[in-house]
Each structure stands twice: as C-alpha cells, then as structure tokens.
Amino acid sequence: MNPALHFRVAVRDPHAHLFDVTLTIEQPAARTRVALPVWIPGSYLVREFAQHLQGLQAVADGQSVPLRQLDKHRWEVQLPAGRQRLELRYQVYAFDASVRTAFLDQTRGFFNPTSLCLRVLGREDEPHALAIEPPAKALGLAQWQLATALPPQQKNRQGFGTYLAADYDELADSPVTMGPMWSGQFKLRGVPHRFVVTGAPPGFDGERLLRDTQRVCAAAMALWHGPTSPPPFNRYVFMLHASQDGYGGLEHRHSTALLCQRADLPLRPLPGASAPTGAGTALKAGDGYTTLLGLISHEYFHTWQVKRLRPAEFTRYDYDRENYTELLWFFEGFTSYYDDLLLQRAGMMDAATYLQLLAKTINQVQQTPGRQLQSVAQASFDAWVKYYRVQENTPNATVSYYTKGALVALCLDLTLRAEGHTNLDAVMQALYARCQGGPMRERDLLAELRRLGRRAFDAELAAWVHGTGELPLQALLEQAGIQWLTETAPLAQQLGLRLADGPGLRLKSVLRGGAAEAAGLAAGDEWLAVEVDGQGWRVHSLDEVARLARGHAQLGTLAARDGRLLRGTLPWPVPCSTVQLKPAASPAEAVSSRWLQE
Ligand SMILES: [Zn+2]
C-alpha cells in the first residue's frame, strides 16, 4: 500500500535544530487546505505548534504554486485543474526537550507528529505514510537508531524507513525518537513491549528497569483484564529520555514518551557487590527511581484510561482548539490513584512506603486553599487556562484534578470495600466493558457504581467531585485500619507562604488567609528583615525568623517590592499540622479491607 498522503522527514541540520519535512499529496483537491494542530492530546494547553513551522512552499507537478495563509495555523493552495501531485515543503524548529513537541540536536532527535505533520483537511481518515531518512553520513550520526510504535512498511536495521498510520489520528498519536539508544524488550500476554532509552548514563542498568517495568505492566493488565485475558493492543513502546533535570510523560495508544533525570535511573551493581534480587530491591518513598516507576505506571495505565476509555468530548479530537471536559479528575485523578498503588500491588513497595506517598498527596491537597473555591470538575474544564498556566495565585484559586482526583478515587475505593459488595478495580473493569473501551460520561460511572455497589453514589460524587467540602479521608482510612497521625507542619506552610528556589527569602506564593497575607507580603517580594521589640534584624531563612519570633504573638516585617520597602505586621500563627499514615495497627483490620497487599 502506498498512501496518497506521504510525509518525508529528514535530519539535515541538527545544529540548527531543524527537521526538514515534505508532505506529498496525491490527487490534491483544487482547493487544498492544511493545518498544524494547536495542541497535543494529553496536555491540555493551546501551544501553537505553528510558531515553529517555517519556510512553507508549495510545488505542484514540479512547479511552484502560491500559498495563502488563512490564520495562525492553516494554509490554502489553489491549484490549476488537472494537477496530480502537490508537495508542501517546510522546516520545523525543534529545540524543546519536553515530551510534548519536538527536539533535535547532534545528540538525539524526537518529535510528535502534532509538531511536524500538517493535517490535510477533509482527508484525515485516509492512511498516512511517514518516511524518516537516516541522517546523512557526513553528519557522523551513524550510530543513531529510531523507535516509534507505528507499524513499519519497510525499515533498515536501525529503524529508519517508512511507517504507516491508518489515519491522521494514529499518526498524531505516535511520537518518534532517534539517537544512540539502549533498547530492551519483553512480552506480556503475547504482546511485545519495547523499552528504549536515550541519554542514559554509563553503568545504566537497563535490565533492572525492564524487569521492574514488566512487573508494573503485569499489575495494570491484571487490574483491567483479570488473570489471563489479552489487552486491547498488540504492541507497546516506552520511549524514555534521561536528561540533567527534566521530568514528564505523555500517554499514547501504543506508546508513551517519558522524561526523567539521569540520576533517577538504576545503575548496575559494581563487580563484587552482591547483586540485588527481586525481593531485595524494595522501593523507597523519596527515591528518584520510585518516582520514575510511578511515572511509567501512570502513563501505561492511560493506555486504557483516557486513550481508550475516554471523555465523550474526546470521541474525536479537535486539533484546532481547546477540547473541554469536566472529567479530567476521573482520567488523571484515578490514574494517579492507581500509579503508586500498582507498584505496591506488584510487590515492589511495602504498605508503609505506599502510605508515605499517599500522605504526601493528602498534604498537597490540604495545603491548597483553592480546594475550597474550585471543584475538581471545574478544575478539569478550566485546565486550559488554569492548571496548565501556573502563576503565583494558582494555589489560591485552583485545585489539582490529579491530586484531589486521586483522593476521590481513594474515598470511593475505601467506601466500596467497607460496604463489602465490590471495589474500585471491579468498577473500572465494568465501566471499560460498558463503554466498550471508548467514549464515556459521568453517568456511566454512576451507573456502574450503583450496579456493583448496590446503591446510588450520586451524593458522594456531587460532594466530592462537584463540591468543595473536605473529603472524609480520615474516617475512611481509619475504618480501613490505617493509622492517621499528625505532625507539626513546616514553617512555610504555617506562615501561609511558599518560597522560590534559591538563596534568601523570596516569596513564590502567598496563601489565602494566612499570616503572610495578613502582613501584606506578596508573591515576588524579598522578605528582608523582621522587627522584634523595636529592633530590626536582617533575615535570610525562615529558621532565623522563627528564632527571632520566639515568645512573640506578632512581629514587624520589612520586604522589598518594585524598588520600594514595605512594612507590615505578621501575626505569629497557631501551629498547624500535616498528616502521616501508618499501616494497620492490627492485622485483622488490614485483612478485612484487603486494600493493600502485605
Ligand atoms: Zn496522566
């Protein structure tokens, strides 16, 4: 098969960070319109990928033809009658190391087709070919390999060649990575899973990463399909880039693009050291590798939860504008609930460690004043202008549909388990079956909760998802046998502020209703000094402030803002607390909820 829509991507100038792209359209319409997406599914922000497209030219049957730009991301070509072939040639600037766009230098290349591939309007449902040329020999990149989840039509040993997509959606959903790479593979229920890593440090233990990833994947498959049924995909590719300080992931139907810190990767044991065994490598809560496996677990879970089962509004993505849904608390939040829980279920983490991670999520939500203003349904809808546009007032005005959504999942799961008829795993499976792994609405979730839970959960969802009241976390966790303990919160939290990174006391955010706000401090201020008993003291850390404040109900503050010095009065706060969770005090309680594995 030779599709009538054909992209050719070439790496000719990695130092200029430019991909050369040619789109060939056979039998073009007399008026052909093309567009570049403004966003990439999974990352809910209009990113205007067209800002990086340059030098667009149109050639029909070997002759240059005029192009008209219609708006920020669409172009039109009017063709003389009888033209057989239209070629659009352009370059895309690629120097964003995130998983959402494109990157090219002499060390590696990566792109999402949403950044490189124009959509031919009206022909989105036709098959598309994507040919990627190996870098020219003169560039000295002979060791580069290429990986993508698209099925190949023909490729060389290093993976360069022509790949096929059934339609534009599949093309757009299939990132491509290239460069020197580590590559490994395993099969799960007959499905090949490939893992490629670029940027890995010397001594990287790929075998361990592969082994641990397989355990995570097996736990996810067991959740969605029980002990033996096959998953709804026939191939999967993990594409990880290890960088100095990056982090992120983006889900796709047959792959995921991941970004981690190089320091988070496992290293091979030194010769002579005792080799870690499966049981001897329990994950710890604060480790970078734990975070990486949580990310892998999260993106893999999305293969079902948002890439197949998905909001009805995402039945067909609209690449031209925002795609609004109120359901990100379910798709991102429930995925966040299960990402760490699956590590625990896979036997890679004990209950105490899992509970440390859960407590962190609870504290994050509790320390966000915006949870009392915005529901997670509203946060989902507003993701495009709020969650993805973080600014100093974000914690006061918004709540994260990831973290609070995860706690909604926890509350549902613990409630279902306590009532004894079902659990959230069974509800997820039933929902997937009900919606045939496709578009769904909130009422579908309510229907499965009612059927399997044997009562209506409308009131819970109204309060937890559409309301802003507190979740019944303590009662449900204690009922499940978990010990809910408290300890004094960090001083910044008590003072109602967040500090920017770096030396000195520079404020990133001032939290609603807190002591810092009462003192008139604002985001961006440098807090210079405090005044105690009529004497001024220069301060550089909150510890200094606390020492000076000992025994005083309030203290004067001096801060710099916009070239001026501002004085205020800071009421010293009553200590507030954060939550700590510990495993069940009695084994009987732990067994009765069967929530965490021991
Ligand atoms: Zn996610």
Image (cartoon, grey):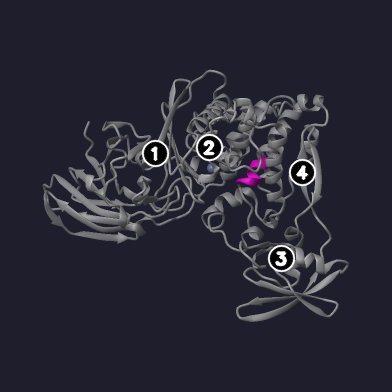
Residue 417 x/y as whole percent:
72, 28
For the magenta stretch, what is the residue range?
A: 402-408
Residue 546 x/y as whole percent:
79, 65
Residue 45 lies in magenta, yes or no? no
- Which numbered dot is residue 181? 1
Q: Which amino acid does label 3 sit on?
A: Ser
Residue 562 x/y as whole percent:
60, 78
Counting other residues with Cα less than 10 Å from the Cα at mark 4, is it few (<14), some (14-19), or many (20 or more)?
some
Disc 4: which residue? 580
In which quarter of the view is residue 286 placed? top right
Mark 1 or mark 3: whose residue is earlier in sequence: 1
Disc 2: which residue? 267
Q: What residue type is labelled 1?
A: Met
Q: Are marks 1 and 3 in contact (CB under 8 Å)?
A: no
Q: Which amino acid does label 2 sit on?
A: Leu
Front residue (pair 524, 287): 287
Q: Distance between the residues labelled 1 and 3?
A: 44 Å
Q: Are marks 2 and 4 in contact (CB under 8 Å)?
A: no
